[in-house]
Image (tube, rainbow, N blue to C red):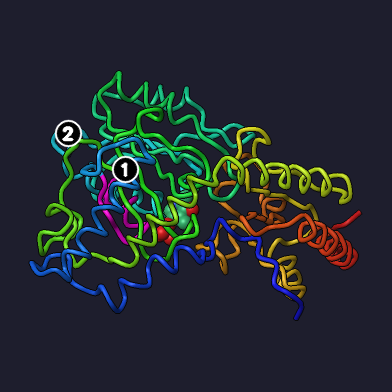
């Protein structure tokens, strides 16, 4: 096989050299449990405290508002279940959207079974949530609104700040799943007016299995895990010190390079979309072209199955995905593309390419070439292709 071309950075990203170096000492040399009272432990404790400060400064919040978790899924689960439980006496209504990650949607489905009422707001044809649907759904028993900052499949940026305004006026908690946004575009908890925010290190060149939940001071949540007193008694278990240190270093690197990198990715992304639309017939870009993450490209190609295209692209050393990696293997069309109003047969022909810091124009040219050729072959075999 030729060289690997990795275009699935929304699924996960490689750990950078700098991150790996920052983590290394905490595996062997400085392995002390942060809860110990001797010098070895103090090093670990200090590293965790510094990591908390780094993350907080990026978000524009206090370090005491950051809780380290095992990643995006845990943070989403904690935010939703936590508020639902904490505010059970006040109300049992939650508002979210049809295009959330399954970490939010499946948690909501379970909360429904436990007696909560959930409204799933729709999106317009460009993949932006309909504010009026959220406004109309808000009622006196609404305790939580959860809207992602950026969608993981089609990269669309959601009007979280506007929703924050609305939530604040009505005294409703607002959570945002910022897993795709944090480390890629500026994310400020005050600009977004959010009370809770989830992020995950492996989506911004940090290690897998570590993330955080931001909880605005004054917002009450029950503990995620009971046990020792770690994370101020809210999330028990010995801290993942190397992971936390690695996440903070990844965040620092992301912040330093953000502007330049986003600009570069935007140029490559737009070139990618324009060239594909120019060269491949019956292709469409999914999601707004403007209100979009700098690294996300998502197409539908009519008369083919996205999965078949991906298998053939893999044979050329190209890693891409259809729908989200978490649902790969199922033949259901993506819930996000369905929410855009695309018919199932069109939604099934979707492919997502997500660029990374390492992506080059040469790689994109190669991917376009292979994609165009493969689609032509697949369509020749299709009984539906005119
Ligand atoms: C990847 C992802 C998650 C899950 O994060 P993990 O750290 O893998 O649990 C949640 N939400 C979104 C939007 C994601 O892209």
Q: Tell me which residue sits at (87%, 64%) in the image.
A: 373
> Is residue 101 at least partly visible in the picture?
no
Is the CB atom of the residue marked by disc 2 within 8 angstroms of ligand 1's nearest atom? no
Q: Quadrant of ligand 1?
A: bottom left
Pinpoint residue 33: horizontal percent, then vertical percent: 17, 70
List the residue tagged with mark 1: 56
Q: Tell me which residue sits at (22%, 65%) in the image.
A: 44
Q: In the image shown, does 100 or 165 lie closer to the viewer? A: 165
Determine which quarter of the picture holds residue 355.
bottom right
Q: Which residues are magenta?
A: 66-80
Q: Relative to 111, is 104 on the left or the right? A: right
**Is residue 208 rendered magenta in the image?**
no
Q: Relative to 159, is 315 on the left or the right? A: right
**Is residue 73 rendered magenta in the image?**
yes
Determine which quarter of the picture holds residue 135.
top left
- Mark identifier at residue 218: 2
Report the quarter where the C terminus lies. bottom right
Pinpoint residue 13: horizontal percent, then vertical percent: 53, 62
| Main secondary structure found in the magenta portion | helix
Q: In the image shown, does 250 or 94 lie closer to the viewer? A: 250
Q: Relative to 262, is 374 on the left or the right? A: right
Pinpoint residue 169: horizontal percent, then vertical percent: 30, 18
Pinpoint residue 79: horizontal percent, then vertical percent: 28, 46
**Mark 1 residue element:** helix
> Is residue 55 at least partly visible in the picture?
yes
Against 242, is 357 above or below? above
Q: Tell me which residue sits at (63%, 39%) in the image.
A: 341
Q: Are marks 2 and 1 in contact (CB under 8 Å)?
A: no
């Amino acid at each position: 096989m030729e060289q690997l071309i990795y275009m699935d950075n929304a699924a996960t990203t490689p750990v950078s050299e700098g991150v790996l170096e920052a983590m290394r000492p905490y595996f062997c040399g400085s392995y002390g449990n942060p809860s110990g009272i001797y010098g070895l432990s103090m090093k670990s404790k200090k590293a965790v405290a510094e990591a908390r400060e780094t993350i907080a400064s990026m978000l524009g919040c206090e370090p005491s508002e950051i809780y380290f978790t095992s990643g995006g899924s845990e943070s989403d689960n904690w935010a939703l279940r936590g508020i639902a439980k904490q505010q059970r006496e006040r109300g049992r209504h939650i508002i979210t959207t049809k295009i959330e990650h399954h970490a939010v949607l499946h948690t909501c489905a379970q909360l429904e079974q436990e007696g909560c009422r959930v409204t799933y707001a729709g999106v317009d044809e460009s993949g932006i949530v309909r504010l009026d649907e959220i406004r109309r759904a808000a009622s006196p028993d609404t305790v939580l609104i959860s809207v992602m900052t950026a969608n993981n499949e089609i990269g669309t940026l959601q009007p979280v700040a506007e929703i924050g305004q609305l939530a604040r006026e009505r005294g409703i908690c607002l959570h945002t799943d910022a897993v795709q946004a944090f480390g890629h575009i500026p994310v400020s908890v005050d600009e977004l007016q959010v009370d809770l925010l989830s992020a995950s290190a492996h989506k911004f060149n940090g290690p897998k299995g570590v993330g955080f939940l931001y909880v605005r001071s004054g917002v009450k949540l029950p503990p995620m895990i009971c046990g020792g007193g770690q994370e101020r008694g809210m999330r028990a278990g010995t801290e993942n010190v190397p992971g936390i240190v690695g996440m903070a270093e990844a965040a620092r690197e992301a912040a330093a390079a953000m502007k330049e990198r986003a600009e570069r990715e935007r140029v490559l992304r737009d070139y990618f979309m324009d060239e594909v639309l120019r060269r491949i017939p019956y292709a469409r870009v999914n999601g707004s072209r403007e209100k979009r993450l700098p690294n996300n490209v998502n197409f539908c190609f009519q008369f083919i199955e996205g999965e078949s295209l991906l298998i053939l692209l893999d044979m050329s050393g190209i890693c891409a995905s259809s729908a989200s990696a978490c649902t790969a293997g199922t033949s259901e069309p993506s819930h996000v593309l369905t929410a855009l109003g695309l018919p199932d047969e069109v939604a099934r022909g979707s492919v997502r390419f997500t660029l990374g810091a390492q992506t080059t124009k040469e790689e994109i040219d190669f991917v376009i070439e292979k994609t165009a050729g493969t689609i032509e072959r697949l369509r020749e075999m299709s009984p539906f292709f005119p």
